[in-house]
Image (spheres, grey):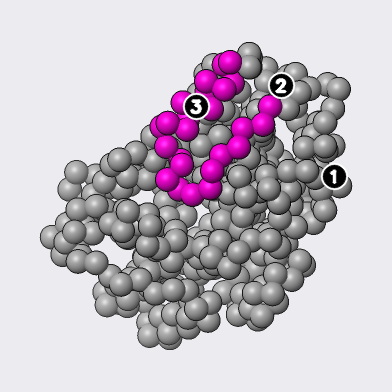
Amino acid sequence: MTDLSLNLKSQEKQYNIYIDNYSLADFKSKIVENIGGKKVLAVISKKVEKLYGDKIFPLCDDEKFTVYKYILPDGEKHKNFKNYQRILNFALKNGFTRKDCVLAIGGGVVGDLAGFVAATYMRGIDLIQVPTTLLACVDSSVGGKTAIDTDFGKNLVGAFYQPKTVIIDVNFLKTLDEKQFKTGLGEVVKYAFIEKSCGMVEYENLINFLGENFEKLMRKDAKILKKVVEICVALKISVVEKDEKESDLRRILNFGHTLGHAIEKYTAYKKYTHGEAIVQGMIFAFEQAYKVGLIDENYKFAALNLISKFNFRSVKMPNMKKLANLMRMDKKATSDSIVFVLPKDYGQVQICKFTTEELS
Ligand code: GLY
């Protein structure tokens, strides 16, 4: 098992992130050692409950606490205020106290929504993240971002709220469908392009690693999957430890996301996956960076070559003026500028600001 830890200096808070192929064997001890109260609110994705519910819940059975199951339908559209309120009411009805905890089992939608419930229920109760998609393993379960979507955009209401622990079992990834797996790969590729900017003392060279292990990764070879998750989580930890609240460095994790989020919003979150949208955002960033002379042709070619290897579904680019308006709703935008993360060298990025006119 790989046991990584995230240390937040500001709050003197530290938590562990366990990564393994448990086959769920170690699962119970990891959960039990992190539960303080008598009640556990397990918010679980409908798909995951169907596939793994009969294995997970007997494991959670313990005389020290009772598990209350809340099954959440799958899909971004369910990460909304209605479900947030329903889960809070469920917890209140069942008498959850401040000592109890939320166990989020699922992908980014479950993690973000259940995380926001944990962040706000009685001003905050413990949260354990059990990510079951690649995207949630490498990104959303680590670092404390919790949120719900609104009519005005994605993740516009939320809180920074760190989990008590994150338990990653890459075995869950074996049953991911192609679409879900690929959307996570979009985030993995992102880490390759920002790796050197994440501030780790040693780095793996994820661009080469992905190129060399491409076939195994696509076959979901357990060893390679675990290694990829470990590299991405270590990079995320490095960034979050330096800038928990995204005032500076953490913005690099949004490489490809400014445009990606606008594409998702423009197409009402229906046409493209998050991964496909951010991959288009990265392609756009490489093209812009080349145009303004930040990167040379060799790097642009190598980067686009790696992206094309994964055969992500391509995005039909909407009108840039319309996208620019949507990008102004981005949380990183100010009243007169839009923040973009652009590549500047192999595995390195920099933060740039553009006015709406410049973008158009
Ligand atoms: N998903 C980007 C972040 O956690 O900052």
Residue position for label 2: 39
Image point (30%, 48%), residue name: 330
Mark 3 and mark 1 in contact? Answer it, CB < 8 Å: no
What span is in magenta? 68-93
Q: Amino acid at mark 3?
A: Arg
Residue position for label 1: 26
Q: Name which of mark 2 and mark 1 comes first in the sequence.
A: 1
| Residue 163 on image: x %, y % | 62, 35
Q: Quadrant of the C terminus?
A: bottom left
Question: Does residue 291 sit above or below 356 in this rendering?
Answer: below
| Residue 261 on image: x %, y % | 35, 55
Residue 246 image-quadrant placement: top left
Going by the image, does 171 lie left or right of 189? right
Q: Amino acid at mark 2?
A: Lys
| Residue 81 on image: x %, y % | 41, 32
Label total for image:
3
Image point (42%, 55%), residue name: 254
Q: Nearer the viewer, mark 3 or mark 1?
A: 3
- Report, in whole angstroms, how far the alpha carbon at label 3 lies from the one at label 1: 31 Å
Question: Does residue 52 sit above or below 156 in this rendering?
Answer: below
Going by the image, does 233 lie left or right of 193? right
